[in-house]
Image (cartoon, rainbow, N blue to C red):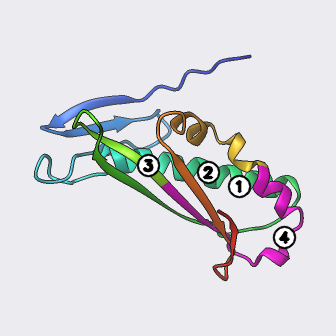
Amino acid sequence: MSGKTVQVELRQQANYQFLISFDENLPPLLGDEPAPLGEGKGPSPVQLLAAAVGNCLSDSLFFALQKFKQSPEPIHTIVQAEVGRNAEGRMRVLRMTAKLHLGVQAHELQQLDRVLEQFEAFCTVSQSVGLGIPIHTRVLDSQGVVLKD
C-alpha cells in the first residue's frame, strides 16, 4: 500500500480567522467561526468538513458512473451536519446526511444499481470520517425519485 501526504497550512489572521493555503496552484481560503465566537467571514471548520464529505461523495458517484460511460451531470449535493453536545457535554458533529441529486432521470443511466451499491466505498473522505461520525447517504434522480437511502 502506497501512502501520500496531503498538507495544508493555516495562518492566523485575526482571532478565529485563519488563512488556509493548499498549494501554490490554488488560491487560499479564509476560515472563520460564526458569530458570536468569530465573525463568520469564511466557512467554519464544520462547513469545511461537510464540504469535504459532500465533494468526495459527489466525485465518487460521478467517477463510478463515468466508468460505465454514463453522464449524470450536473450532480447537485447537499450535506447537513448536525452539531450538538456529546455525552461529556462537548460540542461535536453528531451525524451527517448527504443528499446527492443526479442531473438526469434514473432510466437514462445504465449500470445504476451496480454504481449505487459500490460508489461510497471508494470515497476516501466519507469512509474515513464515517469511522467516527455516522454519515447517511441518499441519492435521488433529477425528478426527486429516491434511488438509494
Which numbered disc covers residue 118?
A: none
Residue that carries the numbered disc 1 in the rendered image: 61
Which numbered disc covers residue 95?
A: 3
CA separation in Å, label 1 and label 4: 12 Å
User: Residue 143 placed where, x, y %?
Assistant: 67, 83
Between tags 2 and 3, which lies in front?
3
Q: Quadrant of the N terminus?
A: top right
Residue that carries the numbered disc 4 in the rendered image: 109
CA separation in Å, label 2 and label 1: 6 Å
The answer to whether 123 appears left or right of 134 in the picture is right
Q: Amino acid at mark 1?
A: Leu
CA separation in Å, label 2 and label 3: 16 Å
Highlighted magenta segment, given as a residue range: 97-117
Foreground residue among 133 and 18 = 133
Tell me where residue 149 sits by quadrant. Answer: bottom right
User: Residue 94 placed where, x, y %?
Assistant: 38, 45
Residue 3 vs 129, above or below: the answer is above
Between tags 3 and 1, which lies in front?
3
CA separation in Å, label 4 and label 2: 18 Å
Which numbered disc covers residue 57?
A: 2
Determine whether label 1 and label 4 are within 8 Å by CB.
Answer: no
Disc nearer the start of the sequence (2/3): 2
